[in-house]
Amino acid sequence: MLIFKALLDMKKNFIITGAAGHLAGVIIRKLGRLGCYVRGLVLPNEEGPEQENAEYIKGDITIPETLDPLFSGLDPKETALIHTAGLISVQEKVSPLVKKVNVDGTKNIIAKCLQYGISRLVYVSSVHAIPEKGKWEEVSEISDFDPDKVEGAYAKTKAMATKAVLEAGKDGLDVVVVHPSGIIGPYDDGRNHLVQLFQMYLRGKLPAVVTGGFDFVDVRDVADGILSAGEKGRSGECYILSNRYFTMKEIAEYMRLALGRKCKLPVLPLGFVKTLAYFFDFIAKIAGIRNIFTPYSFATLGTTTYYSHYKATVEFGYHPRDMKQTVKDTMDYLKGRLK
């Protein structure tokens, strides 16, 4: 709370893009409880979370002229912008839409920050924008981003956008970049790909999990880290906001304990399931539904990377919570929303 008190002394207004998203919603709720004024950007068909002192503007980061109402009438010296808007993709190839949103949209936000003189831009990138190392090697922050050194549409476009943000920092814009790992946690109804797995388990539709895993982190910890980086982060620097590597077997066990179920989910070899991924992808395209079991998503679970949050911990006191509590809170939230 002392960190957030200092933040309030520094900034009074916050512009949040992607305000209808999981992470942005948690950030907005935290700022609302602190008495900050929030102006959130939502798409024309979206609504932002109900929160005192929050106002929502309909617009699109890919259409620059729709962004001006976000900035008008605010004192730029008292205003920070947190750019969370983006399009998550579990596909391998970069589609025109993913690039338009994640790269061109970010460049539009940069241009508007420069035009209106916004005091600080906090860009929410991803650990996927950072190249992996060898097996079980620790990954820390980098300053040079190259889309050719990472795999998958999301990673490549996040690398391109991060590079654009840091270049804007060299040109005089006050920027800070954060790299969350795999975000999970309460206050999402299934738009988050990982939370969708929790829903499937809750409804008895998750027959098994696979070997492998990833670095998962609580959305509330990421929100705290973003606000702390916005206040204490050094201009032009990047900060990883991670927890630790968890196997899918661990996550499944946390889900089982949270619901008090007796039977453990079987664990299938990742290599075997990968052979079915293209089939899942094909069926999803025919059915016109979102497929979270893509070749790329399974490849991600096959990574053996440790993402270090040491820098964020040392510089502004970032400390992620126990994942057991995250899973329990997520399950409790989803149970309350289950119809």
Image (spheres, rainbow, N blue to C red):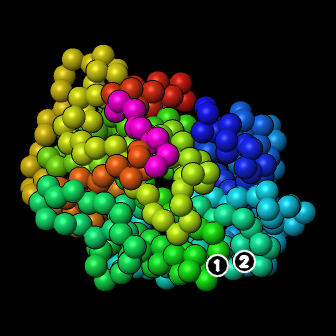
Residue 307: percent from left, percent from top: 29, 54
Q: Which residue is under mark 2? A: 114
For the N terminus, which image quadrant?
Answer: top right
Asked if residue 105 lies left or right of residue 40, the reply is: left
Evaluate whether residue 331 shows in this view. no
The range drawn in magenta is 315-323
Q: Which residue is under mark 1? A: 172
The kind of residue tagged 1 is Gly
Label 1, label 2: how far apart the Cα atoms are: 9 Å
- The quarter of the picture where residue 295 lies is bottom left
Residue 322: percent from left, percent from top: 35, 30
Point out which mark residue 18 bears: none
Residue in the foreground of this view, choosing between 44 and 313? 313
Kindly identify the residue that appears in the image at 49 percent across and 46 percent down.
Answer: 316
Residue 304: percent from left, percent from top: 17, 55
Evaluate whether residue 147 shows in this view. yes
Residue in the foreground of this view, choosing between 135 and 332? 135
Q: Is residue 48 magenta?
A: no
Q: Is residue 180 above or below residue 206?
A: below
Kindly identify the residue that appears in the image at 46 percent across and 49 percent down.
Answer: 315
- Secondary structure mostly taken by the magenta-highlighted segment of the chain: loop
Residue in the foreground of this view, choosing between 273 and 85? 85
Asked if residue 71 lies left or right of residue 189, the reply is: right
Kindly identify the residue that appears in the image at 41 percent across and 45 percent down.
Answer: 313
Disc 1, SS = loop
Kindly identify the residue that appears in the image at 60 percent across and 39 percent down.
Answer: 3
- Dot placed on the residue nearer the N-terminal end, 1 or 2: 2
- The quarter of the picture where residue 54 lies is top right
Q: Residues within 10 Å of mark 2 (few under 14, many from 20)?
A: some
Tell me the mark number nearer the camera, choosing from 1 and 2: 1
Q: Are marks 1 and 2 in contact (CB under 8 Å)?
A: yes
Q: Is residue 317 magenta?
A: yes
